[in-house]
Amino acid sequence: MKNNQPHSRTYVGASKANTTQTYSQTTRPSRKKTKYARLVLAYVIFIVCSVSALGGGVYLLYRTGLFGNSSRSEGEASSTGLSYISSLATTIATSAPEATTAETTPPTPAGDLTGYTVILDPGHGGWDRGTSYPYNSDKNEEPEITIKIAEILKSELESRGAKVYVTRTEDKYYSLYYRIAETHLICMDIAKERGILPFSAEHEQELRTKLENIKTVNDNSYDKGGMGFMGGTGVGEELRELFEMEYQLKDVVFMSIHINAHYDDNTHEPVNHHGIEVTYVTDDAVNTYEGNPKNQTAGAPVRDPYHGRPNENNLLYCQTLYDTITAGMPELKSNMDKPVYTANWAVTRKIGLVGTLLEYGFISHETDRNILTNDESLKKVCGYVADGIQEYFKQIQ
Ligand SMILES: [Zn+2]
């Protein structure tokens, strides 16, 4: 399906293609040097100048951030660089002799996420305040920062053509299972729109009613029915059906947005941890965790083990995000042993999409806090997050 395979060649690649093409053009006229020496000389000079200008364009792109190495807040500058190099490429293709057979299709601009979908889940909210700085204060609170990140990231992703859903847009409490149910409902809508919803109309309605009920209960406890058919351990029939549907949605990714903190247990002074952490789930990790009797809720069903999750893609997604974000912002490199690791967060465990829970840094650490509390810095971070998502989709094509 077209939506599953959008064209995402990067502009960098397109530039290289044009450079190669130009190079081959410079070699061809030299064969005719006896007869057309002056013409060829003029042509070679033209090409050399064009290549230099193209190089200048590439440098300009580098400076404006499309290679992912400089400020992300200058969207207009990026566009300028892009149109500059694009017009140069067109000039070369249309002005040079023997260029009539050259491809003149304009390259796809970098950042094209058209056809892709991202579900953002800003953590905490309402009475659930998450973490803060100073310790246990009402300053620099996690729910406010995560919602801000979601807003900035949404607009960055949408500017690249992506469809974006957000599970929480106000400072209200939404249970983990509310967010999970909402994600399943979004996936059902996407599958239905594409004509690949694998349920009868009756069963679809049944599942929707159950998921809506989980949202209405809006509570994480099994006893109150807040987990619905997802309560207990392992995978029941209905969750399995939703997983199977979501495994097909390879152009949809999930990201839960959180921030970290680490304080000394006794003094409540910050510990020196900093940087981002990108967590993902695998079947083995879930089965090991849920198979542990101490993690089983009394009275809740124990069902089949998890299997079939695209484990490699989860790892690829998270590693790509980590590498891309920290290449752009080395100050967000983690000082811990393993910043990309498996974790059993409910929001990633109970969905079939490729997903992550990404900790955007430690609010307890000054370097991270300066980034997390500054809109311009957050825009920069979100630019690299979007680059990472885009790079992941490119890798799995
Ligand atoms: Zn959190």
Image (cartoon, rainbow, N blue to C red):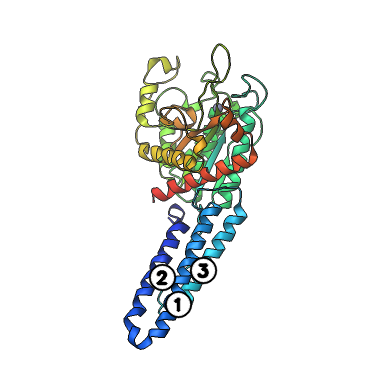
Question: How many residues crowd mark 1 within 10 Å: few (<14), some (14–19), many (20+)?
Answer: some
Residue 114 at what x, y percent from top left?
Answer: 51, 54
Which residue in the protein does label 1 denote?
A: 96
Q: Secondary structure at mark 3?
A: helix
- Viewer-nearest residue: 147 or 74: 74
Q: Which mark is residue 88?
A: 3
Type of amino acid under label 2: Thr
Residue 28 at what x, y percent from top left?
Answer: 34, 77
Question: How many residues crowd mark 2 within 10 Å: few (<14), some (14–19), many (20+)?
Answer: many
Which residue in the protein does label 2 denote?
A: 22
Type of amino acid under label 1: Ala
Q: Are marks 3 and 1 in contact (CB under 8 Å)?
A: no
Q: Residue furthest top?
A: 266
* Image height of 53 relative to 361, above or below: below
Q: Secondary structure at mark 1?
A: loop
Mark 3 or mark 1: which comes first in sequence?
3
Give the residue at x 56% y 42%. Answer: 382
